Image: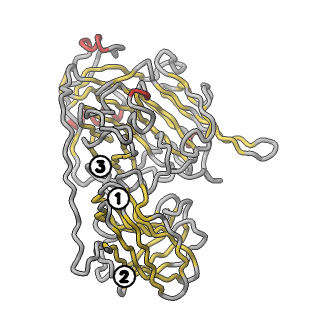
Amino acid sequence: MRKDRLMKTMCAVSAMGMLLTGCGKEKETTTAPATAAVTTEAATAEDKQETTEAVSETTEETTTEKQAEGEMVIPEGYRLYWNDEFDGTELSEEDWNYEEHEVGWVNHELQEYVPSSKYAFVKDGELIIQPTREVDAEGNVHYTSGRVNTQGKHDIKYGWIEARIRVPQGNGYLPAFWMMPLQEEYYGQWPKCGEIDIMEVLGNDITTNHGTIHYGEPHRQNQGSYTLETGDFANEYHTYALEWMPGLMRWYVDGEMYYETNDWFTAVEGEEEKPYPAPFDQPFHVILNVAVGGDWPGDPDENTPFDDRGSMHVDYVRMFRKKLYNEKVSKPVREMVWKEADATGNFVTNGDFAQAEDLTDDTDWKFMAQNDGVGSAEIKDGEIIIKTENFGSEEYSIQLVQPGMPMMKGKKYKLSFEAFADEERQMKPAITAPYADWIRYLEDTPVKLTGDWQKYEFEFEMTAKDDDRGRVEFNMGNQGSTAAIHIRNVRLEVVE
């Protein structure tokens, strides 16, 4: 949640460290570990875990039903560490801290976080976080929301962390169930300290949940996403969980694992990396909040509700932990896979658009409309035609990309293509690094399109570290026009 940077195309994810496109659920999924019903009360410290033994095995179906009802179940091999069922009349300040932050504190968000039970309160067995919108006599709009955490009260190093939540719906909302270290300064300020996002659901895309870790210097992130086949996350309650072990993290929705990763690092720039699995080898605490506006969700609009539809409802938060963990783990070694150029020296596949490929999958070309962007793309007669109905709130709201570009330090490259538009307008091509904090190997460069085919060429030198997962981008959103764009003969090649 605490990004401190502009998120570029969050729908660019993969199974083992952020595949470059697609916000859908992975085709191959596994279920959560077998669970057992619990009849004892929650222990409030690790030395009380012995009292929370599982009393009966359950089937996957029974477990899912009990989770839906809010009944406590414990993953096999785990013990209850701490929980809050929000059964009281107010939020316990023995368990939770209210946070206070000014407008724009991170990510250009619009809300002020105020430490008040007006914005984060317990009602009918739930924690409710309620954003508000107020307009003063001069017409100035002010947004307020709630943010609470367990820092210094309930921190955990490794475990199963779970919550059952109903999220708000509406443009500009970004609810989050996430974790930060007890001591951010241990490895250094964000992102060196690490961040774990268990649930983030955009208010304008309430069928997809994102699970992410942030780490490193420079900043890196690994992310997986889960899209519901039916229903949504705003009008129904769903259970979100993280299984965190030394050197491995897994994310679950309603007991179904959809993403795992074991590849991360942290370092001070110019120094050696800290021993793996740093920074995720220290106690973290839970945070719950609803952000309004900002770089990723965009701003609220006249249809954004600020009543109960705009609130986040948390049925419970639970932490489970194993008795013992083997912390002697080694960092996985990733071998780079370098894409080879075709016979003409072009790294772009189907750059001549001779094949009418699927533009929705994660292979070669992919068209994306996001952040209020509405459009379509079609390959026809040796060109791709991008039509826009709404150019959205971001330049990347209408976007054509191809991942897997091999970017080698010290080499010079040339990106070239031909394009025209139905009316004069602008677009911005770029070569980007989705796995390296979205740095630009070729900066987003505005080009003026006319009604006639023109050729555009850009040369640049690769000065960053080797990257076998660069990406060609054409950004066509929020640049003042919805005129259709035609592109052909796209090439990325090494020039000596």
Task: Choose top left, top right, bottom left or bottom right for residue 74.
Answer: top left
Q: Earlier in the sequence, mark 3 or mark 2?
A: 3
Label 2, on which residue? 489
Distance from the alpha carbon under mark 3 to that under mark 2? 31 Å
Q: Earlier in the sequence, mark 2 or mark 1?
A: 1
SS class, disc 3 = loop
Label 1 and label 3: CA atoms lie apart by: 13 Å
Q: Secondary structure at mark 2?
A: strand
Q: Amino acid at mark 2?
A: Asn
User: Which quadrant would the C terminus be assigned to in this image?
Assistant: bottom left
Where disc 1 sits, the SS reads loop
Where 103 falls versus 417 (above or below)? above
Quick one: label 1, few (<14), some, or many (20+) residues within 10 Å? many
Residue 352 in sight here: yes
Residue ID for mark 1 = 22
Residue appearing at x 49%, y 78% in the figure: 485
Residues at circles 1 and 3 in contact by the CB criterion of under 8 Å: no
Do callouts 3 and 2 mark residues in contact (Cβ within 8 Å)?
no
How far apart are labels 2 and 1 at the CA level?
A: 24 Å
In front of the other: 104 or 169: 104
Please tell me which residue is depicted at 61% across the width and 40% down the height of the picture.
111
Which numbered disc, 1 or 3, marks the residue that appears first in the sequence?
3
193 left or right, relative to 249: right
Residue type highlighted by circle 3: Gly
* Residue wearing tag 3: 17
475 left or right, relative to 279? right
Is label 1 or label 3 in front?
A: 3
